[in-house]
Amino acid sequence: MSELVFLLSADLDIQRAYDSYEQWQEERGAIFMRHLDAAFGPPRNFPESGPIILRNYRRLLVPGFPFGIFYSIEPRGIIVSGVMDIRQDPEAIRRQFG
């Protein structure tokens, strides 16, 4: 099982998404967090399960939510670089990792 290492950018993405869902509907942020936690299972056990979307960055989807987990496989573990709304312009997502 690989260790997950979260960059500050990913932590901030998660916090913003949680806050946004909580403002929209009470307890929705907690539901998002449970789904997000479950989505981290595949990269922990099978790091190459996410398709490569740009250079060495991979993406997995968060079931039930329009979010993707963007990560890379490094010797020190799985580096989670972002957790972003995938409904935005794909070019904006690419610029985050450019």
Image (tube, helix red, strand yellow):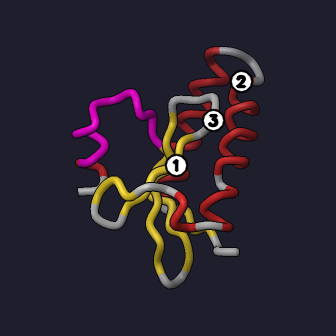
Asked whether 2 falls inside the magenta stretch, the response is no
Q: Nearer the viewer, mark 2 or mark 3?
A: 3
Calculate the distance from the C-alpha at mark 2 to the C-alpha at mark 1: 21 Å
Could you tell me if residue 45 is visible in this image? yes
For disc 3, the marked residue is 63
Residue 28 numbered tag: 2
Position of residue 50 measured from the top left corner of the image (x, y, whole percent): 50, 56
Residue 4, image quadrant:
bottom right
Residue drawn where x is 39% and y is 27% of the image: 87
Identify whether 69 is placed above or below 87: below
Helix, strand or loop under label 1: strand
| Residue sitting nearer the eye, 33 or 52 | 52
- The residue under label 1 is 60
Q: Position of residue 90 (x, y in %)?
A: 28, 37
| Residue 92 painted magenta | yes
Give the distance between the C-alpha atoms of the residues marked 2 and 3, in whole angstroms: 14 Å
